Amino acid sequence: MTLESHTYEQWPYYAAHTIAWLQSYSFPIWLSLGILSILGWLLRWRGDPWIWDKLQVLLDKFQEIAFSSYANHIKDHHRVTLFKYKKWHWRISTPMTKGTWPWTKDRLPWSGWLIPILRSGRTSQKTKAVFMAPDNGNLAEGVAGKAWVANNIIVAPNLPNLSSSSSDQQIARYAKRTTCPAPIVKDYVARGRDLPRSIGAIPIEVNNVPWGVLVLDSREEKGVTPELLNSYTLIVNSISQLLEKAK
């Protein structure tokens, strides 16, 4: 393109050359702008990265204090996980739907879900554990889902110790105690995963609006108790305050 043959020729020199340069490199410019827009959206969605670093430190400290009796144990055996409520979750496949369509009539992408977003410790960070938290509280899954719909602290201690030799009755008993679908529990056992012996969940509010759930789980049957959760409301309030700034 020549400036003389273009309508920009009447423009001031620098303005005309700027327009010509933009048109010559329009694709990489728009590509860069698109990438910057996506990064900006991600930053707004995640919030201030320093806030999330502080939240990680707070979860680690909570884990250290809450499970101080098990200081010599592997950290993965006693965890603190922050779940956020999201209306939509595109879950491709679960033990609930093997051999069928990825979703069932009661478990749909828009059913409402509690999604893990932060966990204490350095290892065992990758988790696919999500819990349905629908408007119909009877269908809420897991101790986390129960705490969400009840908007109250829920604790399930003294859970059965499951292994590959556990019977269907034992698996069903664990599933009932934790309000977790039996096929999911059975799948965990079949894959050799160690399940918690005690679980507790605390609802988290941000600006007085339900935001998510904080879950503590332990491989000790008395690792998580109502007394334990009620003792650390100050830390829970600190997490809520940090989440207000992370929005």
Image (cartoon, rainbow, N blue to C red):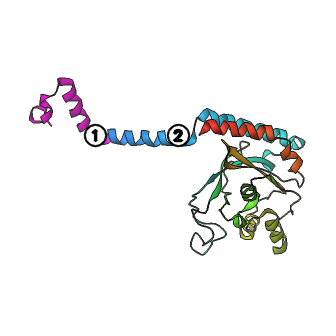
Closer to the camera in the image, 241 or 94: 241
The amino acid type, in three-letter code, at marker 2 is Arg
Position of 97 compared to 69: left or right? Answer: left
Q: State whether residue 3 appears in this view.
A: yes
Q: Which mark is residue 154?
A: none
Query: How many discs appear?
Result: 2
Which residue lies under the disc numbered 2? 44
Closer to the camera in the image, 226 or 218: 226
Callout 2–callout 1 Cβ contact below 8 Å? no
Q: Residue 67: x percent and y percent?
A: 85, 43
Which residue lies under the disc numbered 1? 26
At 12% from the left edge and 35% from the top edge, which residue is drawn? 7
Q: Residue furthest left?
A: 5
Q: Residue 132: x percent and y percent?
A: 66, 61
In the image, which residues are magenta? Answer: 1-27
Q: Residues within 10 Å of mark 1 (few under 14, many from 20)?
A: few
